[in-house]
Image (tube, rainbow, N blue to C red):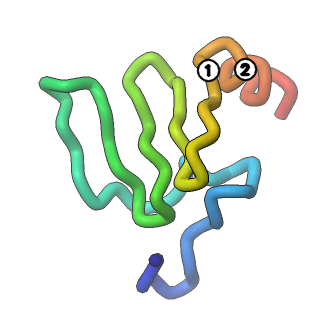
Amino acid sequence: MCQHQPQCPPPESSDREAAHVVAHHPEQGWSLLCNGVLLFDDTGELLPDGRAIDPAQRRAQVAAA
């Protein structure tokens, strides 16, 4: 999906939220990244394959990095 050079991180990578924002809807609390990840204001994520990353898991990943 990504047309940037260098390409943005794929949705499977741990740094997937570093991808460029292609749609931002702060009034609804979400952003769509160019790698297909939906990033929510509460730090939850929805991956293109349908998997959900809940906010608590995301915070734990950031703390471990």
Q: Is residue 6 above or below residue 61?
A: below
Along the viewing direction, whichever of 50 and 32 lies nearer the viewer:
50
Left or right of 39 on screen, residue 51: right
Q: Is residue 16 above or below residue 30?
A: below
Seen at 78% across and 28% down, the residue is 61
Seen at 19% across and 25% down, the residue is 28
Point out residue 48 in the picture as x, y percentages from the top left corner: 53, 54
Tell me the distance, in whole angstroms, between the alpha carbons under discs 2 and 1: 5 Å
Amino acid at dot 1:
Asp
Seen at 68% across and 19% down, the residue is 59
Direction top: furthest residue? 56
Residue wearing tag 1 = 54
Instruction: Assign a secondary structure to mark 1.
Output: loop
For disc 2, the neighbor class at 10 Å (few under 14, some 14 to 19, many from 20) is some
Numbered tag placed on residue 29 in the rendering: none
* Cβ atoms at labels 2 and 1 below 8 Å apart: yes
Point out residue 17 in the picture as x, y percentages from the top left corner: 55, 47
For disc 1, the neighbor class at 10 Å (few under 14, some 14 to 19, many from 20) is some
Residue wearing tag 2 = 57
Along the viewing direction, whichever of 24 and 46 lies nearer the viewer:
46
Left or right of 2 on screen, residue 23: left
> Considering the image in quadrants, where does the C terminus appear?
top right
Q: Is residue 52 above or below residue 20?
A: above
